[in-house]
Image (cartoon, rainbow, N blue to C red):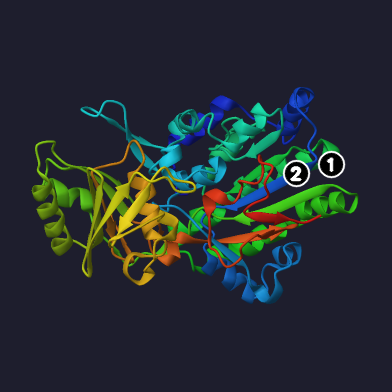
Amino acid sequence: MHFRIQSLVAFTFFLSACVSTFTVSDNYEAKMGHTTPAKRTVILFLIDGLAPEILSNQLEQNKLPELQKFFALEQNKFATARTVFPSLTYPSITSVLTAMPVFAHGLTGNKMRVGNDNDPDVVDFASPLSITKVNDLIKGKTLFARLTAQRRQSVSLAHYFYAGATSSIPLDLDSGIAYLDSNYTYVDTKILNFFEALLTENTPEQWPEFIFVHLTGVDFLAHELGPMASVTLDYMHILDNKLKAVFAHIRKAEMNGKRVVTLLTADHGFMTVKQQFDFTNYLNNTAPTVKTVVDTRFAELYFPKNWSGFERQTFLERLLKESPVDMSVQRLDNDLWLNGPSVQTKISYVGTRCPGTPYAVNFNGNVTCPEDCPSHPEIYGPFFVPNIASFFFADKHPDAVVIAKPGTILNTQNKGEHGGATAQEVFVPLLMRNATLSHPERTLPSYEILRFVDRTSEYPVKLGP
């Protein structure tokens, strides 16, 4: 997650005033009487931007003893899941927290065009002014909301994602100042302090059904310094040490008979940046009537309404030749046209329903469910066909998207980025305690990780004692 930090942050946090670490616990206790006691607690730690490469590096150097012990990581091996397209914070975390693919929840980027199609606004969800907009869009769709409807409790320890939770973390002045000072250790520490207060101020029998803990320091540092910078890697060691106390509380509750399932994952991976290309300036000089929303390593395109399919395709082919764009995808009626240096492919939506999607796809002449498509990661990137099909089936999809070549970004000066379709950006770690994957040979989509929480079926995980 890459917050656009500005002086406005401090003002936004200031409006919420200072709060103690016991506010979440107090608020949760006040609402407990209206809910059903939880027989089991599921805890999800989401470490924003924790690429498998970062985790592997620190495990191999024995820098993460607490994670190693708590999740019983034998020989430093761990499972991986896969995120959505685009591999950005808001679509990714929304998929995790709604247990829905992109087409179902509708958030197609960290930035989106909203409102009237003829005169739309572009909302940047990473802006502090957009916190309520994010939660308004996903309200009623989240796991929090579904649990609340079942009179079951949940707590969100995340500044930006809380719609429907029984209780959530408040915004405060000190955290706002810490964001401005790039003091991410303080921000994550304060969230973990809230978490520890929730666990200790309530008996394990009173713990909620679901707790979401969002930690952002790794992501900030990976953007600013690069994912494999020494400071980024060292921060994981700091975070590991700070997790020691909450892990101890969880272990103690388990020893006393409390059923706790603990998961740890990320929203996206990372790519080291090698070059920057000003895509907006390129369009302004070459095709000013084409509108764009640029979001790190990919950009949405909106063509003039009088352009024919041939004109669109001609423009995209020229774009591939004149800029460091690796691939373009446009939707025309029920067809997706993929174009790249080594590929020209059509994917067609077919009306047949599939498990998890209201459509099948015709890919290279074969009608199949999108999840069953041959992935061809060497051509498109891993799981690109199901991911891009979901993206363009969303109600508010653009006319086309372009994806930058590996190592290239389209609008920032950061040293690390994501948003594209490479393995580095798509794969995320998945650590589990008191649970295992039902089908370990399958790379789990991130939107399936929490599906067992509010359902009678345990799929796609098998729960331990």
> Of helix, strand and loop, which one carries label 1?
helix
Q: Residue at x 44, y 66 (%)?
A: 424
- The residue beneath circle 1 is 204
Q: CA distance from mark 1 to mark 2?
A: 9 Å
Q: Which residue is painted at 48% across and 64% down in the image?
A: 227
Residue 18 badge: none
Label 2 Cα neighbours within 10 Å, binned few <14 / some 14-19 / many ≥20 = many
Instruction: Decide: few, some or many residues near mark 1? Use Cα within 10 Å; few <14, some 14-19, many ≥20.
Output: many
- Taking depth in this image into account, of 139 and 435 the one nearest to the observer is 435
| Residue at (66% x, 70% y) in the render | 63
From the viewer's side, name the closer residue of 132 and 106.
106
- Left or right? Give the position of 168 relative to 130: right
Locate residue 370, reporting x and y percent. 40, 55
Disc 1 and disc 2 in contact, CB within 8 angstroms: yes
Q: Which of the numbered marks, if any, corresponds to residue 41?
A: 2
Which of pointers 1 and 2 lies earlier in the amino acid sequence? 2
Image height of 365 relative to 30, above or below: below
Given residues 174 and 107, the one toward you in this image is 107
